[in-house]
Image (tube, helix red, strand yellow):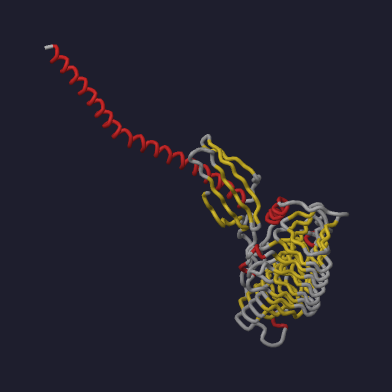
Amino acid sequence: MRKNLYNRGQVIILNTILFLAVSLLLINGVAYPILSHYTATQGLIQSKQSFLLADSATNEALYRLKNNLTIGSTETITLASSSATIIVTNTPSGKRVAITSPGNTYQRNIQLDLTLGTGVSFHYGIQSGQGGFVLQNNSTVTGNVFSSGTVVGNGNTIYGDVISAGSSGLISGIYATGTIYAHTLQNSRAGKDAFYYSAATIDSYTGSHVTGIKYPNSTDQTPVDLPIDDAQITEWENDAAASGTATCSGGTYTITSSVIIGPIKIPCDLVISGSPTVTIKGHIWVTGNITIQNNSILKMDSSLGAQNVAIIADDPTNRLTGSLISIQNNAAFQNSGTTGSFVFMISQNNSAENGGSVNAITLSNNTTALVAYAAHGLIPLSNNISLKEVTAYKITLQNNANVIYDTGLPNTLFQAGPGGGYNVLNWTEI
């Protein structure tokens, strides 16, 4: 009897053990997938949170750069108690932004490559501000002309359209092969149509004065700002300064032999002479005057491709009589070898805007410059100057000067600044 009870006890224990084992297997079979799914879900959530943080930091950096807001070389952004690090470095064509999210198992890092973007374009061979545009002697323009002031000549020819905007707009003494637009036309002719409010003396020339249709009492064209504003130029200056500052000698930085330079800030006058070939790899900001002479060649580095480069004369302490550019004795400029790339010579001299007569940019002796720009100053052109484009507060053409408008220039877009900022070249998770 005892033996039977003993055997029964063993059976019960074995059954219990077996039941527990089966139960544990069943529980594990049910619980493990649940736990695995929970772990995977938590990992996915953490990964998405990490990516959201990195992506938010990327967008923050992009927003600041595109809107010309302050951003340091290293920044930190915090979201939901987690932080990501933003590292901004300069590249030959713009900026590189590297984003590092929190250093955990689910770290998500992003790299953003930005190229100097769109925002400003030239649509005219000649464009002047309120100071207007004057043609003298036998000077001509091959291309379109836009002026927020007057356009005055003495029988000079403009091979294109001419616009003198605003209620004070005046086109006088001009023959345009294209269409003309002005509030008042005086002693002028058009190869196509003529839009004007009044034109008492449009027929002073003999022959066919308006080949197309006359549109009297037309609405005045709206004046437009010049294509580069000061904020944009300041950004280019900051980009140049961020890459380093040159060392001057006796108040001058002199280049007499071939060299590769830029982006860089030069805190004094810049003189280039002695026929060197100067290869430009980025923006150059000169806080003084610029003199380029004696067959010197300035060319863009081929790595810039379709990008453009600005060489700026801007002394913030002296824009009335300083911040000048003088290009003489057959100095020449070359692009990167890619169609649509240009060198821009920019002066921030503001003498003309303040009623003065100081020349912001002076070009002489058959000098070839691709683009000359002085939004606040005067640019006089004389002799056989041949430019791709010139824009200034006031422009005068003398002797046999001829501005030849490059047909690719309307598609040439400037970099950075409030109007365009940076374009995204590459957005990659690393």
| Residue 132 horizontal side relative to residue 33, left or right | right
**Residue 101 shows in the view:** yes
Closer to us: 194 or 82: 82
Name the outermost residue toward the bottom: 207
In the rendered structure, the answer to whether residue 365 lies left or right of residue 199 reads: right
Task: Name which quarter of the figure residue 386 lies in.
Answer: bottom right
Between residues 100 and 163, which one lies in front from this camera angle? 100
Residue 179 at x, y = what percent?
Answer: 63, 77
Q: Position of residue 207 (x, y in %)?
A: 69, 88
Residue 235 in the image: state x and y as whole percent: 69, 53
Give residue 297's quadrant in the image. Answer: bottom right
Above or below for 26 versus 60? above
The quarter of the picture where the N terminus appears is top left
Q: Nearer the viewer, residue 385 or 223?
A: 385
> Compared with residue 280, is residue 190 higher up or lower down, i.e. above or below?
below
Residue at 71% from the left image edge and 50% from the top image edge: 242
Furthest residue toward front: 3
The image quadrant of residue 127 is bottom right
Q: Residue furthest right?
A: 250
**Residue 261 position within the rendered picture, expressed as x and y whole percent measured from the top left:** 74, 59
Q: Residue at x 80, y 73 (%)?
A: 330
**Which residue is depicted at the point 60% across and 44% down?**
86
Question: Is residue 220 among what the camera can see?
Answer: no
Q: Residue at x 83, y 54 (%)?
A: 248
